[in-house]
Amino acid sequence: MRKSLTYSLLLLLLITACTHRFEGVEDNTPVGNMECLWQTLDQKYCFFDEKEVSWQSVHDAYLPSVQCIPTDDYLTLFDTLASMVNTLNDGHVNLYSSFDVSSCSTWYEGYATNFNWSAIKSYYIPSYRVAGGAYYAILPNDSIGYMYVPDFETPVSSNNMAYILRSFLPCRGLIVDVRNNGGGDLSYAYQLAATFFSDDQVIGYWQHKNGVGHDDFSSLEEQHLHKKDMPSSWFRPVVVLCNRHTYSAANFFVSMMRYSDYSAIIGGVSGGGGGMPLSYELPNGWLLRFSSVRMFDRDKQSIEGGITPNYLVDDDPQTPQDEIIEAAIQWITNYYKNDTSH
């Protein structure tokens, strides 16, 4: 994931999330700050069951090291607490200070990159337009539209989409690329997805942490996609491209698009990030951000670990072609071969 995109996403979510103080440990010492962090997550974090982490064991493993940190050694304390929260393997768990921001990388390490924007621009769309948060063009010689949405920090508005789809009127299919999209505003993901549905839909569920126990949650609440948010529609084949760096709001976009009647998901397993973040302040003023609401797809399955595409395809960085785009082109071609009504 591009570092600048990751940092801006984390900063955006930090700013927009509510910040609270934990009513518990208030001792501004290294141990006091660790205990406050540990207890906050112990009572309010929502994915202990999926992460398979013994949080008590993490506490016991880190406590001796924290006890040895001098009160004025804030750098060592920050690095130690950052390492501690990274055991949760969650890109939505971060520690913020005035001198650094922690982030977890283990959730995407070891996966193929599966994206090269420079190569795509050179080989597929040497000329393109930009509308809101989308880059778009018609692929040469294929009568297929291509949209790249790099994040959900900038919306693709209904007005943007009207012009984009107008330019794609000659096209027999559309590719929506959200590879390396690290997320942003969830409402923008809902709005874009509404393009590919004809009416309102129950598109997923969420569940709030409502008690101090690891299994204390509210009942599932329906999440609705509203067609009025995006009057423009596309009812021809659409392929969504994703990779492991497709995270958070982009991950939920991929989840929603699985329920469109004309769609396929192609690429690598998405990154997950199926939790809504909340921020708490430690005694020393640092902020702890973490997942406090867990999200599910329409089949009531958690999306925290990522979405498996309909077709798993890896790109070969040694070739000018993008195998994932090529697979999308082939899927659209086969759609018409297999459906005599088109």
Image (cartoon, helix red, strand yellow):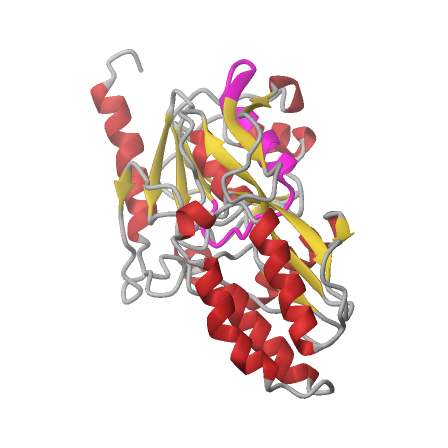
Residue 197 part of the magenta segment: yes
Q: Which quadrant: the C terminus?
A: top left
Q: Position of residue 247 (x, y in %)?
A: 49, 49
Residue 276 part of the magenta segment: no
Highlighted magenta segment, given as a residue range = 178-202
Query: Would residue 147 be seen by someone viewing this image from the given angle?
Result: no
Q: Going by the image, does 23 lie left or right of 274? A: right
Q: Position of residue 195 (x, y in %)?
A: 55, 25
Query: Would residue 36 be seen by someone viewing this image from the given angle?
Result: yes
Q: Residue furthest top?
A: 341
Closest to the observer, 74 or 215: 215
Q: Going by the image, does 293 lie left or right of 287? A: left
Please tell me whether residue 149 is drawn above or below residue 261 in the rendered image. below
Q: Quadrant of residue 41?
A: bottom right
Q: Position of residue 14 (x, y in %)?
A: 70, 55
User: How many marks are shown on the rendered structure?
Assistant: 0
Closest to the observer, 112 or 165: 112
Say which residue appears at 63% left-offset and 79% top-offset. 77
Say which residue appears at 40% left-offset and 25% top-offset. 299
Q: Quadrant of residue 301?
A: top left
Say which residue appears at 54% left-offset and 13% top-offset. 199
Q: Position of residue 81 (x, y in %)?
A: 58, 72
